[in-house]
Image (cartoon, helix red, strand yellow):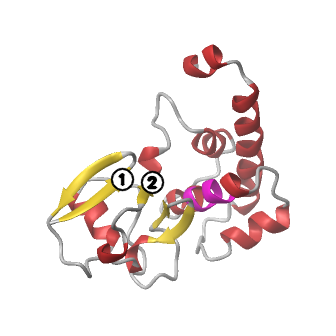
Amino acid sequence: MMRLKVNGQDHQIDAEPDTPLLYVLRDDLKLNAAKFGCGLGQCGSCTVIIDGKAVLSCVTPMVLLEGKQVTTLEGLGNVSQPAPIQRAFMEEQAAQCGYCIAGMMMRAQALLQRNRKPTDEQIRSELAPHLCRCGTHMRILRAVHRAARLMETAELAPADKRSAQ
């Protein structure tokens, strides 16, 4: 048995040490936002955040995760209370097929946690590992900038107003 902390909750997982995190998320925990794309860490659709860093879950073995905090897209928000990054992607209509978007949102979230005002060049560089063929790249760029503004607004809002959002 292995212990794993995902989205703030502790889990006991019966998995081999070399089992990729992606399989545990999808098969054991039923968290399906991270997608299986290539299985080789080359497309980005499986991206999650581990201790503040964007990580490809398809090539991250369970043995490396003891004591680490894993965050998936489900851990950021939900339909009724989306996180700023989720809300921004919806408002900018940044997704078409949606396969790569969860991974892009997670990598963008990790970027915004480090840098609240990224430039277009920084966003493009951060999202470069993600394969996307839908052609919404300009919308994605706008969505990341919108998320940065939403995050800033949320931080400036009084505490009672934040809890109502």
Q: Are marks 2 and 1 in contact (CB under 8 Å)?
A: yes
N-terminal label among 2 and 1: 1
Q: Depth check: 157 or 130 in front?
A: 157
Magenta-span inclusion, residue 109: yes
Residue 79 on the magenta span: no
The residue under the point 26% across, 65% down is 24
Q: Quadrant of the C terminus?
A: top right
Label 1: few (<14), some or many (≥20) within 10 Å? Answer: many
- What residue is at 42 percent from the left and 57 percent from the top? 69
Q: Is residue 142 above or below residue 162?
A: below
Of residue 160 and residue 119, the one placed in the foreground of this image is 160
Q: What whole-number distance in Å separates the C-alpha atoms at marks 2 and 1?
A: 6 Å
- Per the rendered image, the range of residues in magenta is 106-111
Q: Residue furthest bottom?
A: 40
**Compared with residue 75, is residue 155 higher up or lower down, i.e. above or below?**
above
Q: Residue tagged by mark 2?
A: 71
Give the amino acid at mark 2.
Thr
Residue 6: which numbered mark, if any? 1
